[in-house]
Every structure is written in structure tokens, then in C-alpha cells.
Image (cartoon, grey):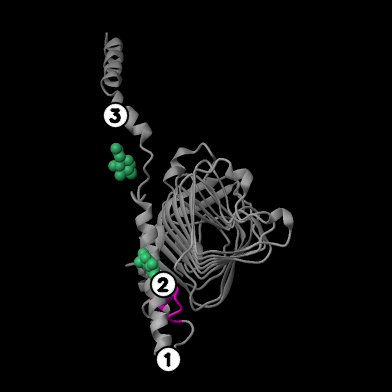
Amino acid sequence: MPLPTTCILFICFFLSSPSFLTKATLNLTLPHQHPDPEAVVQEVQRSVNVSLSRRQMLSLQGKGQRSTCLTGNPIDDCWRCDSNWQKNRQRFADCAIGFGRNALGGKGGQIYIVTDSSDRDPANPVPGTLRHAVVQEEPLWIVFAADMTIQLKHELIVNSYKTIDGRGANVHIVGNGCITLQYVSNVIIHNIHVHHCKPSGNTNIRSSPTHVGWRGKSDGDGISISGARLIWIDHCSLSYCTDGLIDAIMGSTGITISNNYFSHHNDVMLLGHNDRYALDSGMQITIAFNHFGDALVQRMPRCRRGYIHVVNNDFTQWEMYAIGGSANPTINSQGNRYNAPPDQNAKEVINLMLFLSFGFLIVRPTTS
Ligand SMILES: *[C@@H]1O[C@H](CO)[C@@H](O)[C@H](O)[C@H]1NC(C)=O
Ligand SMILES: *[C@@H]1O[C@H](CO)[C@@H](O)[C@H](O)[C@H]1NC(C)=O
């Protein structure tokens, strides 16, 4: 009687390993989550200190430096002080600070030059297009042959180990999508304008050389990060999208969002899927040196769970509130400039309704 034997064996297996099952279901640690987020915060402060003291030393010596170098911004100083940066593009991968500092992007891979701004068939992209570059398996450092506006036909699904480097060209990504980082790691997006992104989908889209998948309808985020790790978004401008400008959800971690300009938008940044999504407790994100500019309404960011370091950002007004949180996030706000709007009902930096379920808010003066 083979059937009962199998059943008994099966039951024995479960009975003998309850601890294995408990651990497997309770392990909420995400890959690449740092055991001590405060150590990463300290490291950010140290690198800002180093950049600032270099700048101060130079001004004491009365040496007039070009304004693009030795600015006190450790990320910019890391590559802009190299007048030969065009020849050393991949050095940029070493310039990140904060939780996304280990994002490799396409470091070590070949340079891929985008020459064709078209996006005719998202299931079968032609060589020379951005979509053809981002779906490849190997690390690629993607640059642009000329100024271009890429009107996406559908979401741009980016594979792991890619840098999209817009330096030296004026690159706009608009249309349907826009950029989707889903269950990938090590992506750097730098110096790109992302705007007017709209929902789309219910179609086949290529996500790797060997996989074309059916995609439902997207939200219309500028950059949608979902279950992704080691992501760095720097010096982009983002505006006028249907949903979030940048959203990070579903256990995404190891992320730095720096030096970006956000404008003309309602729900700017959502960090965390929903209040009950436990994996987002391991979300660790640095929001540094961004300018939250004209005509923004709310969510700069809106945090659920996780550890969010909001440092040295400039908030020039908002319509409802700047930062919101729920489900016990830790929000470490340092050295930000909050310029509240004249509207008496929107003076709070922090949304107090959301704040009722806050775990921990650190507001410290900073050294910079
Ligand atoms: C939990 O998951 C993390 C990340 O995948 C892993 O590094 C760690 O070893 C796991 N811990 C246990 C107890 O399984
Ligand atoms: C940064 O510099 C300030 C003084 O300018 C100092 O108080 C602070 O401890 C430094 N932080 C780190 C992490 O080095």
C-alpha cells in the first residue's frame, strides 16, 4: 500500500521540522539589508564632512576652483573633479553614498551606445535602442550618442547590472511606462529626464534576451522599484507622471536617491507597499541632496516600515505635507531645508494623521 506510507512520511517530515518552517517564514531580513543602518548614516556624514572640509581649505587658500568641482557634495566631487570623466565613466559607480552605495550598475561591463531613440516593438527591441540595451544579461554601461527623447511604447523593464548614464547628452524618457526595476539588482540611473509617464500594458514586453512576458497595466510611475536591491538614482529630473515619480515597494532595499530634481507632481515618492507588508521592514533607503521643487503636493517621501535617511534635501514648498509615514518607519531627517507654504493648513513638514502610527522619528541638526 504505497499511498499511506507516503502520507506518513510526509507527516513525519513536517512534524520533525517545525523549527525549519518557523524560521523560513519569519526571516524578514532582506538580502543586502545592513545590520546597523546607523553605521551607514555615519558613513554618509563622514563623506559629507570630507567634501566640505576640502572646499573650506581651498577657499582659505584663495584658490578659485571651477564651481562644478569641490562643491561639498561628495557624489559630485567624486567624478566632476576628474576633467577626463568621459574616458573614465565607470569610476562613477564608486561615487555613491548611503544605502545604495554598493550598487555596481554596469561596472566592469562594456559601453553600449544608444543611437536609436525609437521603441517600435517592446517584445523585440532592435540593437541600438535603449530597450535592447537594458534587457541584456551581462553588465552594460549605457550611454547616448546624441541628445534624444525616447518615447516609450510600454514600460522599460531593466535587467540587473546596468548603468543608464546620460552624461554628455540631453536624454528624456517619456510616454508609457516608464522605468521598471522589478526583482533585479545593481542598477544605476544617472542624468536622465523622466516625465509624462502614463499607465499602459496588457501586452508582451521583453525583459531579457530569453524572456518575453505578458504585462498587466502599469501605474504610470516615473521609476517603479519593486522587490529590487542595490539601486542608485542620481541627478535625474522627474515630473508630470500619473502615479509616483519614484516608488519603492515589495521588499526593495539598498537604495540611494540623490541629487534629483522633483517637480509638478502630486504623489512624489512612495516607500513601502502597504502597512501590513512585513518585508518592507528591511527597506533601507537614503534620500540625499534632492531638490523637491515647484508644484509638488505630498509624499516627499511617504514611508512605511523600514529605515529612511532623509539628508541635506531642499524642500521648496508643498501643497499638503512633505514627509508622511505609517507602520513604524524610522525616518532620520538631517540637515534638510523645509520651506513651508503660506497656506495655514499645510504648514506641517510631517503629516500628523499618518504620524499617529509612527515608530521613530529622528530630527537632528546636521554638520553641513
Ligand atoms: C535570513 O535571510 C538573509 C537574507 O537572505 C540571510 O542572509 C540570513 O542568513 C537569513 N537568516 C536565517 C536565520 O535564515
Ligand atoms: C562631521 O563634522 C562635524 C564637525 O564639523 C563633527 O561634529 C561630526 O562628528 C563629523 N561627523 C562624522 C561622522 O565624522
Quick one: label 1, few (<14), some, or many (20+) residues within 10 Å?
few
Does residue 86 show up? no
Disc with the residue nearer the chain's start (2 vs 1): 1
Quarter the N terminus occupies = top left
> Marks 1 and 3, Cα distance to the nearest angstrom?
65 Å
Q: Return the x and y of residue 97 as percentages of the image width and height.
A: 40, 64
- Mark 1 CB near ligand 2 (8 Å cut): no
Question: Which residue does the image show at 72% across and 53% down from the upper left?
Answer: 345
Question: Which residue does the image show at 67% across and 63% down from the upper left?
Answer: 264
> Marks 2 and 1, Cα distance to the nearest angstrom?
21 Å
Q: Nearer the viewer, residue 301 or 5?
A: 301
Which residue is denoted by mark 1 in the rendering? 62
Residue kind at label 2, given as amino acid type: Pro
CB contact under 8 Å: marks 1 and 3: no
Q: Return the x and y of residue 363 as percentages of the image width and height.
A: 50, 56
Tell me which segment is drawn in magenta: 69-79
Which residue is denoted by mark 2 in the rendering? 74
124 shown above or below 12: below
Mark 2 or mark 1, whichever is nearer to me: 1
Which residue is denoted by mark 3 in the rendering? 20
Quick one: label 3, few (<14), some, or many (20+) residues within 10 Å?
few
Residue kind at label 3, given as amino acid type: Phe
